[in-house]
Image: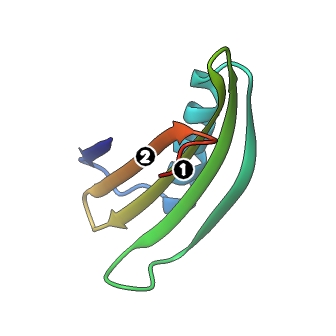
Amino acid sequence: MLTMHRVEASLDPPEVFAMLSDQQLQSAPKCRELHREFTAAREGPGSAGTLAIQIAHELGTIDSTSQSRIITAERETLIAQLTVTALHDSPM
């Protein structure tokens, strides 16, 4: 799932990524964080973050990975987040 937001304020990228990560962790019961990384983007402007979690579910373990890009300007912040979720044993 791809989500994009434009906020009419210049926000602190590490705080935005922490908020996005915490929101994902709180939205899925029985989940645990596997990996979290936040750095300057390697390609293009802004900062990039990765969050990997596992969710215990009656259908089996679910893996979810989110890639975030946060770009701040003088008066706005652009946020794009791509999340891929699949059963742990899925061939994807």
- Left or right, 32 with respect to 15, comes to right
Residue with the mark numbered 1: 65
Could you tell me how far apart the alpha carbons at marks 2 and 1 are, in whole angstroms?
A: 6 Å
As helix, strand or loop, the secondary structure at mark 1 comes to strand
Circles 2 and 1 in contact, beta carbons < 8 Å: yes
Quarter of image, res 88: top right
* Of pointers 2 and 1, the one earlier in the residue sequence: 1
With 63 as the anchor, is 74 left or right in this view? left
Q: Position of residue 27 (x, y in %)?
A: 57, 23
Rendering quarter of residue 23: top right
Residue at (38, 51) in percent of width and height: 81
Residue 15, label in figure: none
Q: Residue at x 29, y 46 (%)?
A: 2
Query: In terms of depth relative to the viewer, which is nearer, 42 or 71?
Result: 42
Residue ID for mark 2: 83
List the single residue furthest toward the front: 91
Q: Say what amino acid the circle numbered 2 marks.
A: Thr
The quadrant in which residue 29 appears is top right
Measuring from the top left, give residue 25's x and y in whole percent: 64, 33
Foreground residue among 54 and 66: 54
For the residue labelled by badge 2, is the local secondary structure a helix, a strand or a loop?
strand
Q: Quadrant of the N terminus?
A: top left
Image check: 59 left or right of 46? right
Q: How many marks?
A: 2
Residue that extends furthest to the top in the rendered view of this protein = 58
The correct choice, above or below, for 54 with respect to 41 in the image is above
Residue 74: give x, y in percent of width and height: 27, 67
Q: Residue at x 24, y 47 (%)?
A: 8
Give how far across and how far down residue 50 sits, in percent: 56, 60
Q: Which residue corresponds to the image point at 47% horizontal and 68% vertical from the top-left? A: 48
Q: 80 or 64: nearer the eye?
A: 64
Q: Residues within 10 Å of mark 1 (few under 14, many from 20)?
A: some
